[in-house]
Image (cartoon, rainbow, N blue to C red):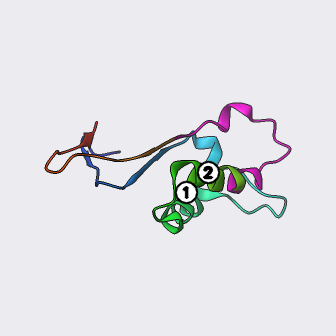
Amino acid sequence: ELPAWIPLEDGGVLLLFPDGLDEARNSNGELLGQERLEKTVAEAGSSSTDELLTEVRDLAGSFNQDSGQGDDKTVLLCRIRRAAGEVLQAT
């Protein structure tokens, strides 16, 4: 269960994806997994959202290539930007 409030830091990344994305497997049977997605985001550092989205798309493309799961390819990617002193939270 997720917490009711999630603190968001300036410059942080919010990535929302369907469960089928991290459950995809590559040709070797390896699971894509949430950890690989988290690592991709963490390694992107301050990359632009376009660059980060390309990284996530390339990673996902190397998994489940023949599955036909078109509904599991949609992601929402946001980089948090705020004015000084403003508190941001997602519910």
Residue labelled with disc 2: 22
Q: Mark 2: which secondary structure?
A: helix
Label drawn at residue 77: none
The residue that appears at 57% across and 54% down in the rendered structure is 52
Question: In the rendered structure, which disc, 2 or 1, sits on the residue that comes first in sequence?
Answer: 2
Place of residue 10 in the rendered image (x, y in percent of width and height, measured from the top left): 29, 54
Quadrant showing the C terminus? top left
Mark 1 — residue?
34
* 74 vs 14: above or below: above
Question: Residue shown at 47%/65% (left/top)?
Answer: 45
**Residue drawn 53% across and 64% down?**
44
The crowding category of the residue bearing disc 2, from other C-alpha atoms within 10 Å (few below 14, some 14 to 19, many at least 20), is some
Give the amino acid type for the residue marked by disc 2 in the picture: Asp
Crowding around mark 1 (Cα neighbors within 10 Å: few <14, some 14 to 19, many 20+) is some
Residue 49 location (% of width, % of height): 52, 49
The stretch in magenta equals: 59-76
Of the pair 45 and 64, the residue shown nearer to us: 45
Q: CA distance from mark 2 to mark 1?
A: 6 Å
- Mark 1 secondary-structure assignment: helix
* Whole-percent x, y for residue 18 in the image: 57, 39
Task: Report the amino acid beneath label 1.
Answer: Gln
Asked if the residue under mark 1 is in contact with the one under mark 2, i.e. CB atoms within 8 Å, the reply is yes
The picture quadrant where one finds residue 29 is bottom right
